[in-house]
Image (tube, grey):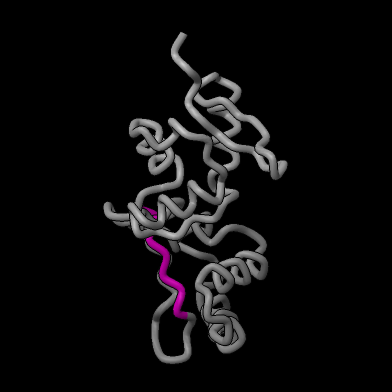
Amino acid sequence: MIKDFDKLKQQLSELSEVVNKFESEAVQLRIVELVLGQRTADVQGFSEGGVNDFITGPGMMHVVRNAARAGRRRTTTDSAKGAVAALNELLESDFFDEPRTIGDIVARCQDIFGTRYKSNAFSGPLSRHARTGLLNREKNTDGKFVYLKPEAA
């Protein structure tokens, strides 16, 4: 068990008023880590079952952290395609039979998939496809890069 538990409980009670002013649980947890001088999950007695339970009564901190969720990213819905998946789908179609700018790609993806993409979401994958020879990259008369499928030899 934690040494001087009653003293720690009193300190946490006093600290909870300040910590609860922050809406983000991550910020609350970081403040507690800084005050305690260590990660709260490492504090003996506070990580049983993967839950740090500082909720013991009114006025206490509202920090509950489930270790099973720690480090997990929020997943997108199945209906939302990532920029790379959308680009790969366009590659499989005849879309790149004609030269296309990034603006054309963004507009086409919005029309087909109903999702708004930023042009910089495509710049890296397009550059990679141009390097690997999956697409050709040229400058058009306006000085913008256009992408098209290489001609079959």
Magenta stretch bounds = 62-69
The vertical placement of 42 against 135, above or below, is: below
**Residue at the spot x=52%, y=26% of the render?**
135
Is 16 left, or right, of 52 in this rendering?
A: right
* Total residue callouts: 0
Q: How far across and down, in percent of the image, does residue 53 sit?
A: 40, 70
Quarter holding residue 28: bottom right
Observer-nearest residue: 98 or 37? Answer: 98
Residue at screen point 46% across, 54% down: 107
Q: How far from the left and from the top, in percent, is residue 62?
A: 45, 79
The residue lying toward the viewer, choosing from 96 and 42, is 96
The answer to if 66 sits in the magenta stretch is yes
Magenta stretch: dominant secondary structure? loop
Residue positioned 33% across, 52% down in the render: 112
Is 82 situated left or right of 36 in this image?
left
**147 relative to 65 in the view: left or right:** right
Q: Which residue sits furthest top?
A: 153
Q: Residue furthest left?
A: 78
Residue at 63 percent of width and 71 percent of height: 31
Residue 134 screen position, x and y as percent: 49, 22
Q: From the top left corner, tell me how far across and down residue 25 is, in percent.
A: 50, 72
- Residue at the extreme right of the image, as rendered: 143
- Quarter holding the N terminus is bottom left
Asked whether, in this view, residue 83 is left or right of residue 68, the answer is right
Residue 127 magenta: no
Q: Does 45 sit above or below residue 78?
A: below
Judging depth in this view, the residue of 26 and 11 nearest the camera is 26
Residue with the most extreme front position: 141
Could you say which is closer to the camera, residue 2 or residue 112? 112
Residue 35 versus residue 19 in the image, above or below: above
Query: Above or below — where is 58 with respect to 41?
Result: below
